[in-house]
Image (cartoon, helix red, strand yellow):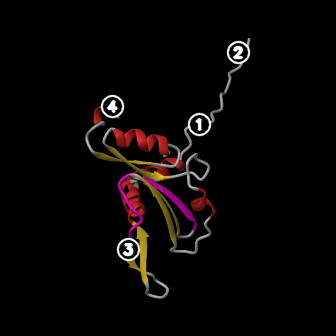
Amino acid sequence: MEKLLGSNRLLITDNYYTSIPLAQYLYDRQINLCGTFRRNRVGIPQEILKANLLPGDIIARQKKYITVLKWHDKRDVIMLSTCHDDRLDSVGKNRKDGTEKKKPRVVIDCNSAKQGIDVSDQLSSYYSPVRKSLTWYKKNCI
């Protein structure tokens, strides 16, 4: 990433790499960060962790340029972003009742950017890199 520092780009990360110190470091070097966030990371506001949300609900907290939000679709999703707010965008209609379906903008951007990665991860999960082999020894008959 050294070559990209200062280039004003967006870095999409998964929950293994996303953290508040990393977001601060990258933002100071003109790189925005967006990604899913583990609930056991240091620095998550407690009111976000303790909030019980119904499907479609959202709770967000922002400090300076860092936004941490929790959104409930089928399960809770915690996101961190340095370039998004808690705005909801329409993504279509609900199949069951025809109501408008909304998602946070940060979720839409992360899903569209990680689409190819998720497919390649899924395809590679079908094949194990560990191969079991049987070695057949030939006895020398004298």
Alpha carbons under labels 1 and 2: distance apart: 31 Å
Q: Which residue lies most toward the right here? A: 142
* Residue 117 picture location, percent across and down: 42, 50
Identify residue for label 3: 91
Identify residue for label 4: 2
Q: Earlier in the sequence, mark 1 or mark 2?
A: 1
Alpha carbons under labels 1 and 3: distance apart: 41 Å
Residues marked 1 and 3 touching at CB (< 8 Å): no
* Residue 36 picture location, percent across and down: 49, 54
91 w.r.t. 105: above or below: below
128 w.r.t. 93: above or below: above
Identify residue for label 2: 140
Q: Which of marks 3 and 2 is nearer the N terminus?
A: 3
* Residue 10 picture location, percent across and down: 33, 48
Secondary structure under tag 1 reads loop
Q: In which quadrant is the C terminus drawn?
A: top right
Residue drawn 58% across the image and 75% down it: 54
Q: Callout 4, which amino acid?
A: Glu
Judge depth for marks 1 and 2 and give the one in front.
Answer: 1
Residue drawn 41% across the image and 38% down it: 25
Q: Callout 3, which amino acid?
A: Val
Q: Which residue lies most toward the bottom here? A: 97
Q: Which residue lies most toward the top here? A: 142
Q: Callout 2, which amino acid?
A: Asn
- The mark found on residue 130 in the picture is 1
Q: Callout 1, which amino acid?
A: Val
Q: How many residues crowd mark 2 within 10 Å: few (<14), some (14–19), many (20+)?
A: few
Judge depth for marks 1 and 4 and give the one in front.
Answer: 4
| Span of residues in magenta | 75-88
Q: How many residues crowd mark 4 within 10 Å: few (<14), some (14–19), many (20+)?
A: few
